[in-house]
Amino acid sequence: MNVAELLARAARVFPDAPAIVAGERTHATYAAFARRAAALAAGLREDLGLAPGDRVGLFMANCPQYLEVLWGTWWAGLAAVPINAKLHPREAEYILGHSGARVCFVTADLPPPGRGVPGLERVIDVASSEYGALVAGGSAPAIAPAAPDGLAWLFYTSGTTGRPKGVEITHRNLMTMALCYFADVDAIAPGDAIVHAAPMSHGSGIYCVPHVLAAAKQVVPESGGFDPAEIFALVRAHPGTAMFAAPTMVKRLVDHARSRAPALDNLKTVVYGGGPMYRADIRDAMAVMGPRFAQIYGQGESPMTITALSKRHHADTGHPRHEARLASVGVAQSAVEVRVAGADDAPLPPGEVGEILVRGDAVMRGYWANPEASAATLANGWLHTGDVGVLDADGFLTLKDRSKDLIISGGSNIYPREVEEVLLAHPGVAEVSVVGRAHPEWGEEVVAFVVRAPGAALGEAELDRLCLANIARFKRPKAYRFVDALPKNNYGKVLKTELRERLARERSDG
């Protein structure tokens, strides 16, 4: 079943209900939303010549048109390729080229992809008259059929090779995620709202699916981003508000609520995930804002659907293991199995630490054009997350470490290898190793340990310029340490643990 059927259903049952809202202004009812998505689908298929299964890029900041493009893409039987608006244009161009996207929709605040992207035929600004003509077209085709395992959402996530991998998310995956939201995360009633303050290219955008299923309002802040004062103003305007937020965003909301005491009556749920939430921080959040929090743990390969710690578990302060549960990421969501396994993928007893494995209808079908990585990650029928954790006797999962030295800063994933490859392109850099350092607001920040080439006079400013020319600003190192040598083991592997310990000692000594 094509997930676009959910929009058609909502439009039939709740045609006059607000569907897309810009701040406090209704952009489209459900009837209008479906009509515009159908018209866009006709334009993509008939005017632009796209065929079922073709890919459509979305290199866009949060805006009402994001939802029209996404659902119009699905209505046409095409696959959406969401691209993080914070990425460097070269990174976006790689994703468009690798995915084979034939059309890309953009917002004017972002630099458009260059004309040299292989296979890219058209770049359309959603503020242009061309886009206006597409969504105003008179044709309203039937929803294109889609197989359950047909590609719907091709999400690019960074990998240890330094190049992002395309995660193939199917219509079945999205439907499973939507049903898990109702079963494990939160209830949604018609007229409720989700505020898209986090990037719609990631978890917030995926959560539009269960909210369309329930005919809820999709509220896009006028700023297009996250501002605590604006969020609380939207909460006052929209009863039954939910939102997805990274832990750093939660912390900013809590700080604002503590100092300004905004009205919270309309705030139903804050779902947090995408990075580590420390136990002291969630206790503080509940003390200031009440039991309005739910946590999810997922990956791009099983989006938003590995485990959940419900509002009920957050509020169950009388439970003897409440503190341990607050430090966990909850229990397996209803449509997946979660296992903590040893080297042979066999399940480990409760209390033992191992790799987290997942299987079920929420797990990706594979990586785009990468059968080797697909086979390795999905070996033995399980998604190998690369994350390390422990299950207790009640099924609560606690993360012990992030995989492959992943750095999570402000809810965004940064793989050190990607940054290292850029720095190593400089002739003055002989060796480099990138690690994360704890940061009170962002969770972690990037630090690069650099060994200069003999005779090189190299400073931070020059390396900063190199990074800004090649990767997104949020990925560049926030500090550099120039060293004579990197610590290594007998096999020549850099000991990143030792580098992180050096940074921890600097902090304690300072």
Image: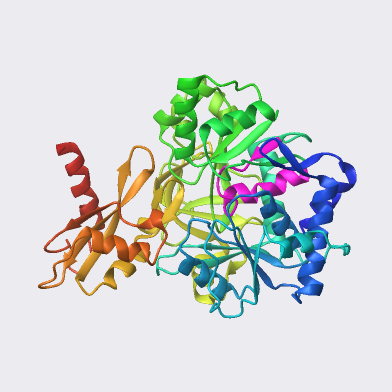
Q: Is residue 177 above or below residue 425?
A: above
Q: According to the image, what is the colour scheme of the structure? A: rainbow
Residue 277: % across, % down: 44, 38
Q: Is residue 246 above or below residue 492?
A: above
Residue 240: % across, % down: 69, 30
Q: Is 494 left or right of 385, judged from the image as shown? A: left
Residue at the location (67% across, 59% down)? 126
Number of numbered discs visible in the structure rendering: 0
Image quadrant of residue 80? bottom right
Residue at the location (22% across, 55% down)? 480
Q: Is residue 39 above or below residue 197?
A: below
Q: Is 107 left or right of 34, judged from the image as shown? A: left
Can see residue 321?
A: no
Residue 211 part of the magenta-drawn span: yes
Can see residue 181?
A: yes
Quarter of the image containing the C terminus?
top left
Quarter of the image containing the N terminus?
bottom right
- Residue located farthest toward the front when viewing the structure as drawn: 129
* Front position in the image: 498 or 235: 235
Residue 58: % across, % down: 62, 62
Residue 81 part of the magenta-drawn span: no
Q: Is 261 left or right of 50, judged from the image as shown? A: left
Image quadrant of residue 499? bottom left
Residue 63: % across, % down: 64, 49
Residue at the location (79% across, 68% down)? 43
Q: Is 294 left or right of 323, judged from the image as shown? A: right
Residue at the location (37% across, 59% down)? 404
Which region of the structure is painted magenta? 193-214
